[in-house]
């Protein structure tokens, strides 16, 4: 059974149909990448899954439960924002504890979860620092740590590496993949970068004007693109 199912999902902004009708099944533990040019609806789709945006039609279910009307905070998912979404006045420890304090988790349990996440992300020795005292990669790891502490059903990433330089992007890419293996959790990752999509994904979803042009493994897309759009997009030189 799929863990996350989108069934005829439709999204309209005013007169602008951004997603006409989209069907997609995501399996437990999969690393799925949404790729497509700017404006193709990747962020909107992710935000619909997260519950940050209301659907105009269709159904979203998670682990068999219809969550179409379920508020964001009750879907059991965690969105990883770009590193600049950290609170500058809080330490790393406070930044990571914040989402748990928001839902009334006990102090002891919060502390334990923050310590665990810090260990996984190699952030233990930075727990008392503020974001301004960290490198770009360390900040991004804190942003991921804020998601990990909530032990989510799935992690949702929206272009998390786009404000990092090329070398750091490469190493963070490997870290996120390692994390995926370690946690064995579902990850949905949005990027407009073909290289990221091809190297990270179990399956790639190619979006164009809110329509899925093709879904497949990187190898399938590379060897048997469904159409010229996919061929050009996947094959485009970087
Ligand atoms: P991507 O992430 O692939 O670049 P988006 O999902 O951000 O694409 O945007 C898809 C389309 O939806 C764009 O045409 C964009 O202008 C429109 N859009 C996104 N969010 C809003 C909004 N809150 N209000 C109106 N239009 C929006
Ligand atoms: Mg976007």
Image (spheres, rainbow, N blue to C red):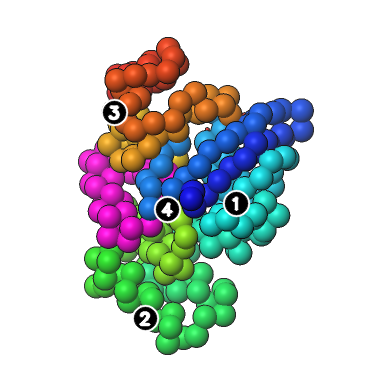
Residue at horizontal 38 percent and vertical 53 percent from the top: 29
Residue 193 in view in this figure: no
Label drawn at residue 112: 2
Q: Earlier in the sequence, mark 4 or mark 3?
A: 4
Q: Earlier in the sequence, mark 2 or mark 1?
A: 1
Q: Secondary structure at mark 1?
A: strand
Label 4 CB sits under 8 Å from any ligand 1 atom? no
Tell us which disc is closer to us: 3 or 2. 3
Residue at horizontal 38 percent and vertical 48 percent from the top: 30
Q: Which residue is mark 4?
A: 28
Q: Which residues are magenta?
A: 160-189
Return the x and y of residue 19 as percentages of the image width and height. Answer: 63, 31
Label drawn at residue 219: 3
Tell us which disc is closer to us: 2 or 1. 1
Q: Secondary structure at mark 4?
A: loop
Residue at horizontal 39 percent and vertical 81 percent from the top: 111
Label 3 crowd bin: few (<14), some (14–19), many (20+), radius 10 Å? few
The quarter of the picture where the C terminus appears is top left
Q: Earlier in the sequence, mark 2 or mark 4?
A: 4
User: Was residue 186 drawn as part of the magenta stretch in this picture?
Assistant: yes
Return the x and y of residue 219 as percentages of the image width and height. Answer: 29, 28
Label 4 crowd bin: few (<14), some (14–19), many (20+), radius 10 Å? some
Q: Earlier in the sequence, mark 1 or mark 3?
A: 1
Q: Do tag 3 and tag 2 residues touch (Cβ < 8 Å)?
A: no
Left or right of 233 in this view: 2: right
Q: CA distance from mark 1 to mark 3?
A: 28 Å
Q: Which residue is mark 1?
A: 61
């Amino acid at each position: 059974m799929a863990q996350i199912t989108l069934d005829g999902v439709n999204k309209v902004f005013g007169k602008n149909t951004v997603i006409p009708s989209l069907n997609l099944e995501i399996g437990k533990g999969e690393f799925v990448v949404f790729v497509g040019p700017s404006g193709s609806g990747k962020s909107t789709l992710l935000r619909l899954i997260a519950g940050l945006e209301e659907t105009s039609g269709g159904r979203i279910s998670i682990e068999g439960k219809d969550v179409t009307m379920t508020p964001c905070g009750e879907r059991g998912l965690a969105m990883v924002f770009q590193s600049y979404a950290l609170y500058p006045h809080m330490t790393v420890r406070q930044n990571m504890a914040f989402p748990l304090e928001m839902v009334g988790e006990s102090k002891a349990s919060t502390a334990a979860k923050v310590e665990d996440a810090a260990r996984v992300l190699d952030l233990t020795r930075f727990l008392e620092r503020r974001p301004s005292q960290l490198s770009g990669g360390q900040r991004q790891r804190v942003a991921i740590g804020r998601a990990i502490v909530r032990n989510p059903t799935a992690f949702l990433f929206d272009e998390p590496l786009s404000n990092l330089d090329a070398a750091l992007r490469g190493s963070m890419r490997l870290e996120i993949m390692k994390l995926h293996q370690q946690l064995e959790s579902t990850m949905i990752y949005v990027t407009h970068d073909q290289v990221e999509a091809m190297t990270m994904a179990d399956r790639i979803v190619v979006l164009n004007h809110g329509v899925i042009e093709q879904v497949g493994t990187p190898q399938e897309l590379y060897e048997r693109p469904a159409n010229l759009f996919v061929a050009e997009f996947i094959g485009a030189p970087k």
